[in-house]
Image (tube, rainbow, N blue to C red):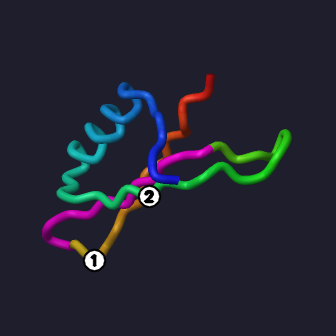
Amino acid sequence: MNEIEISVKSLYEKAKLMLDDGMDTVVVSIFEPDGDGENALPACISFEASTAEDPEIGIDYEEIEAVTE
């Protein structure tokens, strides 16, 4: 999976939260959907951000799920 469609509002809110928390960099990972039926996990992106002072310590932020139609 090379791309994912997410809400601009959700992305903005996540970026603002990381900025407000003093984060300087972020690693963004894309996860493909997993499973079927009621227990299926949708495609999503996750975030691990860190500060310039402590770049080796990453803080996980809640993922953003793909837009579903």
Q: Are marks 2 and 1 in contact (CB under 8 Å)?
A: no
The 10 Å Cα crowd at callout 1, few under 14, some 14 to 19, many 20 or more, is: few
Image vertical order of residue 60 relative to residue 53, above or below: above
Q: The disc labelled 2 sits on which kind of residue?
A: Ser
Q: CA distance from mark 2 to mark 1?
A: 17 Å
Sequence order check: which comes first, mark 2 or mark 1? 2
Taking depth in this image into account, of 46 and 6 the one nearest to the observer is: 6
Task: Give the residue furthest to the left.
Answer: 53
Q: How many marks?
A: 2
Residue at the location (85% across, 41% down)? 37
Q: Is residue 57 left or right of residue 37?
A: left
Residue 68 image offset from top left, x and y in percent: 61, 28
At 82% across and 46% down in the image, what residue appears?
A: 36
- Which residue position is annotated with label 1? 56
Q: Residue furthest right?
A: 37
Residue 8 colored in magenta in the image: no
In the image, residue 20 lies at what x, y percent? 22, 43
Tell me the magenta residue range: 43-54
Q: Using the image as rendered, state which of residue 32 and residue 45 is in the foreground.
A: 32
Residue at 33%, 61% (x, y): give it: 27
Which residue has dot 2 on it? 29
Label 1 SS: loop
